Amino acid sequence: MSMLDGRGPRLAFEDEQAALATPAAGPASAPAFRADGLDPWRLLRLLRRQWWTFLAVVVTINLLTALVLFWVTPTYKASALVIVDPWQHSVLDADRSGAGRPADAARVESEVEILRSPGVLLAVVEKLDLARDPEFTPRPGWAIRLRSLAGMETPPPSAEQAARQTLRRLGPAIAISRRGATYVIEVAARSQDPAKAARIANALAAAYIDAQIRAKVDFAADVQKRLAQQLESARAALREMDRKLDSFLDDSIGTIEDAELRTELSEIRAAIKEQEANRLRYDALAGRSRERARKREWDALIAELNSDRMVRLNAQAAALRQGPEPADSAETAAKLAQLDRQIDKEAQSVIARIAAEAGAAQQNEAELRARLSQRLADPDIPAEIVQHFREVEGDAAALRLVVDKLTTSSTAATAEIDLQLPDSRIVSPALPPSTPASPDEPLIATLALALSLMLGAAAAILRDRLAGGFADEAALEDFAGVPVLAALPPIAPRADRPGEKPATEVLDHPGSAYAVAIRRLRLALDLAPSGGRLALGSARVVLVTAALPGEGATQTAISLARCLALSGRRTLLIDGNLRQPEVHAALDLERRHGLADLLASRGPAGAPDRLVVDELTPHLAVAAGPGDPRCNVDALLESGSLSGLLQTARQNYDHVVIDSPALLPTVDTLFWIRHADDILMVIDATTSPHDIHAGLRALARGGRGTAHLWLALNRAAGRQSARRPRGGPPAATATIRKEYSQSAGPDRTPERAAR
């Protein structure tokens, strides 16, 4: 229910009392937030009030971030790209069509795991000697440090332990990842040195390729070894079968009666043996030559092949090595490499001719065996000899096919050992990075700034919650449920006139922010509805109070009274604080009889000096003076003299402003409420909600008067109006004083006001 319903502060406050009494009511939610969300303007005003807290948090967090970025050693990231060939070719495949199976995602992931394997990392450690690198050297643990401090000797770690510890430190610096759904694998390495990061990444990719080649070579060598064993067994069985066949033929041919046929068969047998011997000799020579060519044993190969061209090429290579130019020079190395290729090409050509001779001997041997088989079909040969020959010859032919196939496979496996190609290759080697990967200074600085701003705002809101107070009149009105007529800014001290008192602010600086706020307060009171007891032509009584002393109620009462007087209205300012009056000191009045003396009828009765006309504001009369400790304040406030004084004031003045004491320390204000039309409660911007709640509750319990309750927020944070230099009273002030002095008449005197 609004305070404008005319039922007085008690009834109007009862509707808000439940909300104010709840623990959730506090300044934290009121200053910056509404029910429908964040109010940026309120938050901005709150930050202006708590700008020291906000600035301290922001500066502290950013300074700590800068220190951390300064002390943290930057690390650089270098990446090499490896592609896995989706097509695999192998001479060992049964299908020699040239197309292998495409690699799937599982195979690529398998290659990623191989790259992460300790074996590949260990090869990098050994190649780059990372075990001696300070960045990756194993650091002694706490146990070793304690033993060293105690003077106990600690045995150095073994090579295996050092390598294992280096691997543990190298592991976090390596990152292996697949690029999306492609066959590309990123090999990344981090180091404090950008060149070292690139070396590690490239070494890791090269070690992976080498490991892949070694694995394939080892597999081909194992296959070749197994094929060689099977080939040797098959050849031994074939030799045994040929020996038995030859023995059988030698014995059987002697039993043939036809001498001419017997002679022909013997010649065929001798020719077969000769061709077989040639084939075996050529095969052995070709096998030895291939092995020596693979090992680049040119001298032994030349001695065995006896090739004139190879002799000349080898002599040229020897002359280059012994020539005047260094053998390790680039030009000499290029020439030697070219000669090496020519020797190898010539050797392969000679080996091919030897293999052709072996093939020709094998072909001749096959033709002779076919001729022998044909001649053994002669009718003159006994049937049992022919049958036994057919059986043995068939077994030998099948065994020769096995030997031929094993020989071909063994030769292919031997060739594949030297012709292995990796299934992966490096498509983009790592380059030394120019900027560090971590810490990302721009990103961290941006995040730190954003975090500091959020934490600074949170700290300002929290401090505002703990310290109490309100940022603006809207926050106070939301909290109290009472209309706030104005927000009075603080009066800034002036260095040019250090002795100037705040009581003259509205006179000396009518254009200041404080004077404008007082005029806004006066206008709000003029527009507000009048109290129930206010008769036509009667003065309006405004009671100015506060919850606690020091909130600026006296200054507000003086400024409001002077503002009313400056507008041409007859105004009476009463110092209602009978225990500790302050108005006479603020206005520099003489220490005469105060209001307590007037109510107690001490001093000259009806003396005109009981009311003093303000020298700076002619339309303002002041009832103020020093306090009297002898008087009974409660009796005076309940006496008829006070009612009579206020009744006379209502008839002779347009406005009566009463400066009453604070609500919480005394009960004097509750006696003044019954005589007031409006109650203006001044609340300092730093006053806690608990004290405001207590002051409003005290007003609500003071009675069922018809006075309206209003609030004024004092010392609110706000933009101060620009002031002109003080070289004397401003022209506007002088003009106002002159106009009001001329308009003062004999009926506006304090004596008339007293009557």
Image (spheres, helix red, strand yellow):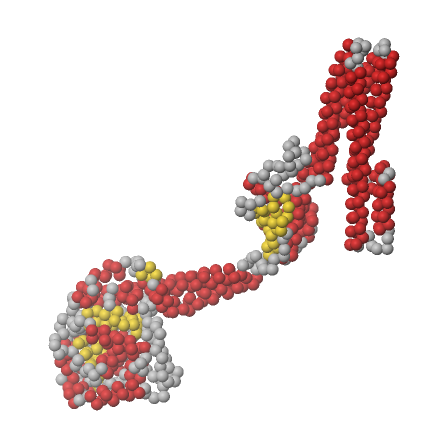
> 578 or 535, which is in the foreground?
535
**Relative image position of residue 329 (x, y in whole percent):** 79, 54
> Which corner quadrant holds the C terminus?
bottom left
584 is higher (above) or lower (below) than 429:
below
499 is higher (above) or lower (below) than 689:
below
Q: In which quarter of the image is residue 434?
A: bottom right
Residue drawn at x 78%, y 45% is 341
Work out which residue is located at the far left of the displayed protein and give it: 536
> 462 or 509, which is in the foreground?
509
**Relative image position of residue 750 (x, y in whole percent):** 18, 86
> 238 or 443, which is in the foreground?
238
Q: In which quarter of the image is residue 596?
A: bottom left
**Relative image position of residue 306 (x, y in whole percent):** 86, 38
Q: In which quarter of the image is residue 603?
A: bottom left
Residue drawn at x 81%, y 37% is 350
**Relative image position of residue 91 (x, y in whole percent):** 68, 35
Residue drawn at x 19%, y 69% is 708
